[in-house]
Amino acid sequence: MRDLVPILKAYDIRGVVPDELDDETVQAIGWAAAHVLADGRGALVVGHDMRPTSPGLAEAFADGVTAAGVDVVMAGLTSTDQLYYASGALGLPGAMFTASHNPARYNGIKLCRAGAAPVGYDTGLAEIKALIDGGVDSPVAARGRVSHRDTLGDYAAHLHGLVDLGDGRPLTVVVDAGNGMAGHTVPAVLSRPGLTVFPLYFELDGTFPNHEANPIDPANLVDLQAAVREHGADLGLAFDGDADRCFVVDERGEPVSPSALTALIAVRELARAPGSSVVHNLITSKAVPEIVAEHGGTPVRTRVGHSLIKQTMAETGAVFGGEHSGHFYFRDFWRADSGMLAALHTLAALRAGSAPLSQLLAPYERYAASGEINSTVDDAEAVTSRVEEAFGKAPDVTTDRLDGLTVEFTGTPMWWFNLRPSNTEPLLRLNVEGADGAVMERVRDDVLRVVRGSGEGAA
């Protein structure tokens, strides 16, 4: 069996097949997951994406689960948020086989407890590892049974019950599925009166023959942008490989900031649940907490990461949560993330008025952002401390270490930046926002000079 240490990540299991992740390893993980997530009884629901290795790995996992005496509900081809739906609606823990946006040679497992509650390293993965390390040898009186259940139609109906597209103006939408699972779910969800959908790369193909299924990279939006302009569409939607993240381009083909979408959806959810909390991670735009407060909500700032967002939503009863990475979380979707729900909110807001998307979102795009900039470093903590020394002692500057280092200038003109280490690579990730483009660029360049060892600058 393969070594588990390299494939156990903060929020999921992920590795190269078969070098790091093979049938034997996955079978052992299934056996341990049955004990940790199902307590050796009941059932688990299992779904998989379109990668060539996914069906076989899902079968191997099911073998491990049933060997522990636990039943398996095989959901077949699903998006990750469709698997979360199944976990929530059926009240079962779940396993989703996907490596999201990673290249074709990768695969992985996203696990959840009943009700789509998140499982990360500290909330189940370490326990699974410990069980496997102790030996997979507990006999049971009877193996579990395997049944099959298609949840696509029920999933689509549930989403439509959460977001009513209404009877507003007709819209033309280009959707780039990136040969990922949106090619499976979009026809079921967006085949609605008043929507004309132009599909791009809907063929399910886990070798990703057209481009990576990673829309956070601008290079992977080029085809969508061109198609929006060609068709004169009202907007474009792009999904990652397992379709749990959604990115948007406006009618001009210009990318929309995920922070602007976070603010838009927050306003809509607060209209439905006045006075609620809204969770945002610390690299979303400063506009997000401002807009949440302006609409009577309570903004709650948290670290980056879906398990942390979901935990904070549970603790605060938040109605919604958003991350600048394109993950959007909904209280009424078991606090799970759903790119499709974010898309439906965007479409519903656009249908309700007459303005183009760029004008609709203009009030939510108040500041200039750098996007995430990576720097390779030998000692992340030493470099971070050097940056804190250079910037943190200036007048009207506050700092915190909630997640990496955040430095904020509270005077005029406004700026802030966050510098945090990667969990898996020798990188520091920098995000900068300023009152305008010139301010942002000045701060960005000053910080990068310190990070990369070519200056002492202070903004």
Image (spheres, rainbow, N blue to C red):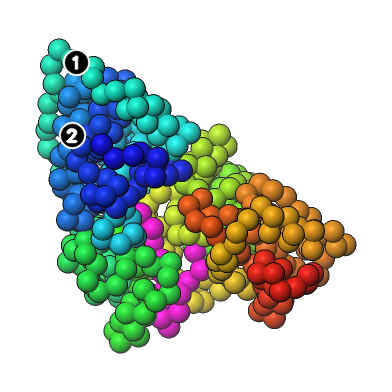
Residue identifier under label 1 = 139
In this view, the residue in front, 30 or 134, is 134
- Labels 1 and 2: the sequence-earlier one: 2
Relative to 381, 253 lies left or right: left
User: The residue under label 2 is which amino acid type?
Assistant: Ala
User: The residue under label 1 is which amino acid type?
Assistant: Pro
Q: Quadrant of the N terminus?
A: top left
Horizontal and vertical percent for residue 384? 69, 57
In this view, the residue in front, 292 or 212, is 212
The question of residue 245 being in magenta is answered with yes
Span shown in magenta = 242-258
At 58% from the left and 44% from the top, the residue drawn is 277
Q: Secondary structure at mark 1?
A: loop
Q: CA distance from mark 1 to mark 2?
A: 16 Å
Q: Is residue 367 visible?
A: no
At 15% from the left and 12% from the top, the residue drawn is 141
In this view, the residue in front, 197 or 204, is 204
Residue identifier under label 2 = 62
